[in-house]
Image (spheres, rainbow, N blue to C red):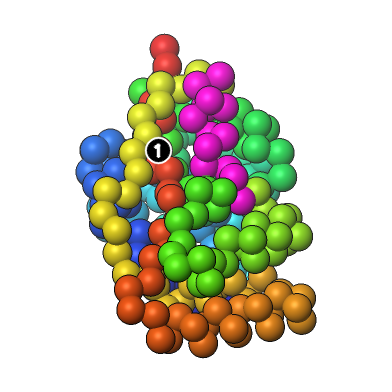
């Protein structure tokens, strides 16, 4: 799983870099990496920010799997109940995390609470309901939707966030990928990590075989690239 998360972080790196540059990460003094996991992005935040980085994840073992970012403070806690005083951070970052938090409105409220008045949230979250795949025989969208919901995730979180953030006191700016890239080979491994049923696994194997012979397959997952600044 750590390898899959690292590959996903690398795929999102250009979009993430643009977002962090726009919010002037070099001048941010207290950064929260929400849902840091094994630290796929934490070293980048440490390198680019101007101060303290706190890596938070509900899984203590995940936080302890990587020793390459000793500069960050590691905290094991639930994203719905952030154990910090109000206005502790001037930047909260999360990537493919809010989709896994049960109680999205509570998590957004907590993020707003721990941000300073001039703080900002940077979030990269997918929306599997908007997947574009072609030819139709290669479509995996239904597999993703069912497997993610069964695992406890919200596969439509992207479209829900802008309105929810606005309602909780944020000014929201949203962008999407503007370039169509070749499908990532690792997408099938990531899907399998969700513990597919035997029938779903059989469907996926058939899709993989057909993909190998496709001339120019399309598999595009929309990501909501969000900058949410605290509203006065």
Secondary structure mainly formed by the magenta segment: helix
User: Is residue 138 found left or right of 61 in the rendered image?
Assistant: left
Residue 80: image quadrant is top right
Which segment did they paint magenta? 155-167
Q: Residue at x 70, y 75 (%)?
A: 200
Q: Nearer the viewer, residue 157 or 3?
A: 157
Q: Nearer the viewer, residue 19 or 31?
A: 19
**Residue 190, position as x, y percentages in the image:** 55, 73
Residue 72 can be seen in this image: yes
- SS state under label 1: strand
User: Is residue 146 found left or right of 113 in the rendered image?
Assistant: right
Q: Residue at x 56, y 49 (%)?
A: 129
**Residue 78, position as x, y percentages in the image:** 67, 48
Residue 90 can be seen in this image: no
Q: Say which quadrant the N terminus sits in.
A: bottom right
**Residue 95, position as x, y percentages in the image:** 47, 52
Residue 113 among those drawn in magenta: no
Q: Which residue is mark 1?
A: 226
- For label 1, the crowd category at 10 Å Cα-Cα, with few meaning under 14, some 14 to 19 and many 20 or more, is many
């Amino acid at each position: 799983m750590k390898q899959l998360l690292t590959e996903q972080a690398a795929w999102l790196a250009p979009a993430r870099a643009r977002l962090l540059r726009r919010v002037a990460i070099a001048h941010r003094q207290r950064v929260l990496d929400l849902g840091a996991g094994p630290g796929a992005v934490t070293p980048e935040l440490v390198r680019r920010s101007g101060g303290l980085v706190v890596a938070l994840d509900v899984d203590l073992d995940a936080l302890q799997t990587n020793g390459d970012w000793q500069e960050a403070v590691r905290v094991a806690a639930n994203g719905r109940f952030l154990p910090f005083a109000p206005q502790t951070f001037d930047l909260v970052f999360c990537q493919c995390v809010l989709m896994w938090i049960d109680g999205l409105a509570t998590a957004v409220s907590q993020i707003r609470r721990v941000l300073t008045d001039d703080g900002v949230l940077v979030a990269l979250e997918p929306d599997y309901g908007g997947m574009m795949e072609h030819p139709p025989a290669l479509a995996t969208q239904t597999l993703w939707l069912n497997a993610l919901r069964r695992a406890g995730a919200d596969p439509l979180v992207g479209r829900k966030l802008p309105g929810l953030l606005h309602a909780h006191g944020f000014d929201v700016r949203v962008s999407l990928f503007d370039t169509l890239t070749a499908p990532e080979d690792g997408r099938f491994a990531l899907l399998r990590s969700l513990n597919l049923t035997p029938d779903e696994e059989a469907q996926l194997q058939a899709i993989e075989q057909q993909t190998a012979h496709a001339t120019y397959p399309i598999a595009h997952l929309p990501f909501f690239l969000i900058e949410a600044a605290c509203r006065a």
